[in-house]
Amino acid sequence: MASNTLNISLIQADIVWEDKAANLAQYEQYINGITEKKEVVVLPEMFSTGFSMNTTALAETMDGATVQWMKNIAATNRCILTGSLIIEEEGKYYNRLLWVQPDGTVGQYDKRHLFAYGDEDKHYSAGTKRLIASVKGFRVCLMICYDLRFPVWARNVGNEYDALLFIANWPQRRSLAWKTLLQARAIENMCYTIGVNRVGEDGKGLVYSGDSSVFGPLGEVIWQESNKPVVHTVTLQKDYVTQTWEQFPFLHDADKFIILD
């Protein structure tokens, strides 16, 4: 059913390195503590393990325990739960974002841009298709971390979506790029742009400051938080996006293009 508002709850957590049980337990506590109406709950990239290249030990199938946990949480809370984890399929490994609905339906997006600087391309296979999910009349384009640096992949061609969502494990040392690029994606695509990142230190010694953010369709900062675990719910307004497009029809003047694999 279409609506003018959508609640999105963002969980900025300190991910316990390669400890699925500990991570799922803490997310369950965070989710249970959300007092606002739960509609979409967002977890960071590789929420159950951290940004690990240990695929053979940590990967699960789509029938695995973590996917089942996501389905149970979504069903119990009558909300959509999204985040990425390590999935094995037909002998290949994917950094796969799942969009899990309360009825058990699962949408999926495999990270397209693999972070070669961190050897992700040596351990994972790249995705080839975007995922634009629909909920309450809102269209949400789902992306993962390094995808943020490649604006063509995220381009809002023909007003395809109302919100752009990035989940990440983005280190503190490049936090300026994270915040700047999120804001740029909001301005150029004229939509809400949300980034959900982790905090803490991972098993490789990388430090994360979070800087999870919400920007409006004109690039204005709606919310941002750094350096601590936090759960924050933001309410998106669909008519604000529509009115922005009507007042500033810049997307109509965009270049037409086709992405070739």
Image (cartoon, grey):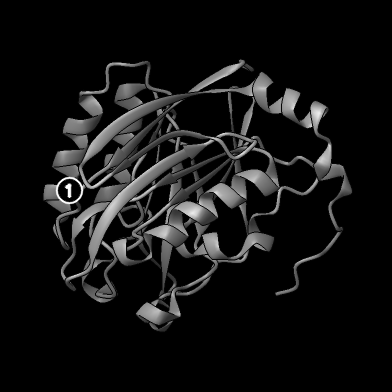
Q: Quadrant of residue 116?
A: bottom left
- Amino acid at dot 1: Asn
Q: Position of residue 1 (x, y in %)?
A: 61, 16
* Residue positioned 57% across, 34% down in the render: 216
In the picture of the structure, the residue carrying the numbered disc 1 is 23
* Up-down relation of residue 106 to residue 75 (above or below): below
- Of residue 191 and residue 95, the one placed in the foreground of this image is 191
* Residue positioned 36% across, 61% down in the render: 170
Q: Quadrant of residue 13?
A: top left
Q: Position of residue 103 (x, y in %)?
A: 44, 28
* Up-down relation of residue 10 to residue 113 (above or below): above
Residue 123: tell me if it is visible.
no
Q: Is residue 70 left or right of residue 177?
A: left
Disc 1 residue crowd, few under 14, some 14–19, many 20+, Cα 10 Å:
some
Residue 113: tell me if it is visible.
yes
- Of residue 26 and residue 118, the one placed in the foreground of this image is 118
* Up-down relation of residue 54 to residue 254 (above or below): below
* Residue positioned 20% across, 23% down in the render: 33
- Of residue 222 and residue 169, the one placed in the foreground of this image is 222
The quarter of the picture where the C terminus appears is bottom right
- Of residue 107 and residue 248, the one placed in the foreground of this image is 248
Provide the secondary structure element on which disc 1 rests.
helix
